Every structure is written in C-alpha cells, then in structure tokens.
Image (cartoon, rainbow, N blue to C red):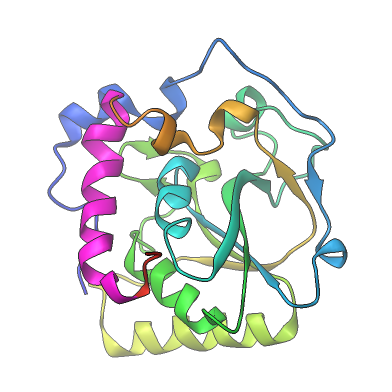
C-alpha cells in the first residue's frame, strides 16, 4: 500500500498549504450543524478526517453510494468555530467531512478502505505541508459497529506492516459536526485551477480514480 502524498515536493507544496488559502467571499452559516438522528433511516453517516478537508471531500464525493459529503469541523471544544479559529489549532477541531451514504450501495467497510488508502495515517497532526492538530488523521464513529470496524481495521493494518511506521489515526466517538463556511464546500470542483488544487489535490484524486475505478459514480 502506498501513501498518496509521497513524491510531492515539500518545498513547493509548502507555498500552497490548505491554511494559507482563505477566500474573501466568506459566507458563514452558523446554523449548519448536523445531528445524525435527523438522517433518513435508509441512509447512514460517517465522519472522517484525512488532513485538509478539500482533499477528503474531493475523493469521497466521487464514490457511488455517497449521497452527500460536507466539509466541516468535529472533535473540538468551541461551538460554531470559524475556519480562522480552527486554523489556530486552539479549538481542538479536526477538518473533516461528514458523509451521508446508502449502505445498500456502499458499505462502511468500503468507506474505511478508501479512508486508509487515500492519506498517510502514520504522520501525527500532519498531511504533507499541512501541519497542526486540525489536520490529524481521525475517525469519528457514530455507533459501536463503526467503532469495532475502525479499531479492527487499524489493528490489522498495523500488524500486516502495510505502513513503515505505526498508525496514529485517532478513533473517537462522534459528538458534534459544524459545517464549514460555504466557500469550502465543493472546493475542488469550484477551484480546480488553484495552485493547491493542481499541486496537492489533483494527483491524489487521479490516483484514487485509478485504484477505485469500480466504485466511482457513473
């Protein structure tokens, strides 16, 4: 198993880290919180953090069976945080995406496979040039079944030696999700020509599309 970010020139990527890009057209929707109890029983919900949520969203929203993917913040101690506040690393939040999916089309196990294979789960509080607790590798489980599967998968990967270093992915209970500002949603689709998208996101997406070709939306 190879980590998607290897081979990227750090000296170049550092110039275009996720936190350095802030859109002046910020449109904050403070009431955009999600409670899993409101999700239709025919669907299920998963919450993952793999570093910058622009990258995470660009990947998961392409999967067949994923109905909606929303970039946002979870795992912190500050209510209704802004992007600027989260970027300080002081709110405790991680940049995540919340995925609403159809379990008849894609299973949680398959989502976990995509999670593990599309970022580096061995680097603590870092993905490439994006550094800070907000970029930590994390799974926020919504029920005991998700917890058991995440813990088991992590243990099996560590035991198999799939990665050269130990996996440091946090596995914690889901508590609250705050949707990010509007300009973060569908970021890659809307800003594909931006330097960060071209240098960091596009290579990850292209490799993901090759590896998971059979699981993509048509």
What stretch of residues is rendered in magenta?
194-214
Is the N terminus in the top left, top right, bottom left or bottom right quadrant?
bottom left
Q: Where in the figure is residue 26, as x and y percent of width and height? A: 62, 17
Horizontal side of residue 218 vs 2, given as left or right: right
Q: Main secondary structure of the magenta part?
A: helix
Query: In the displayed image of the protein, which residue is found farthest to the top?
Result: 24
Q: Where in the figure is residue 148, as x and y percent of width and height? A: 62, 87
Q: Quadrant of residue 211?
A: bottom left
Horizontal side of residue 130 vs 152, given as left or right: left
| Number of numbered discs | 0
Q: Quadrant of residue 166?
A: bottom left
Q: Quadrant of residue 93?
A: top right
- The answer to if 188 sits in the magenta stretch is no
Residue 44 versus residue 137 in the image, above or below: below
Is the C terminus in the top left, top right, bottom left or bottom right quadrant?
bottom left
The residue located at (80%, 45%) in the rendering is: 33
In the image shown, does 99 or 189 lie closer to the viewer?
A: 189
């Amino acid at each position: 198993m190879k980590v998607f970010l290897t081979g990227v020139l750090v000296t170049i990527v550092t110039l275009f880290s996720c936190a350095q890009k802030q859109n002046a057209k910020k449109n904050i929707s403070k009431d955009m919180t999600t409670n899993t109890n409101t999700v239709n029983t025919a669907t299920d919900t998963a919450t993952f953090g793999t570093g910058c949520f622009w990258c995470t969203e660009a990947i998961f929203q392409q999967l067949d069976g994923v109905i909606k993917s929303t970039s946002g913040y979870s795992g912190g101690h500050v209510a209704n945080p802004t992007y600027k506040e989260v970027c300080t690393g002081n709110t405790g939040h991680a940049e995540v995406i919340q995925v609403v999916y159809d379990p008849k089309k894609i299973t949680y196990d398959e989502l976990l496979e995509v999670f593990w294979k599309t970022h580096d789960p061995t680097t603590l509080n870092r993905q490439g040039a994006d550094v800070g607790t907000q970029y930590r590798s994390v799974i926020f489980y919504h029920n005991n079944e998700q917890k058991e599967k995440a813990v088991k998968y992590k243990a099996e990967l560590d035991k198999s030696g799939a990665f050269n270093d130990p996996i440091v992915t946090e596995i914690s209970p889901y508590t609250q999700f705050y949707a990010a500002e509007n300009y973060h949603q569908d970021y890659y689709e809307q800003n594909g020509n931006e330097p960060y998208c071209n240098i960091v996101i596009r290579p990850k997406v292209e490799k993901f599309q090759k590896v998971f070709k059979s699981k993509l939306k048509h």
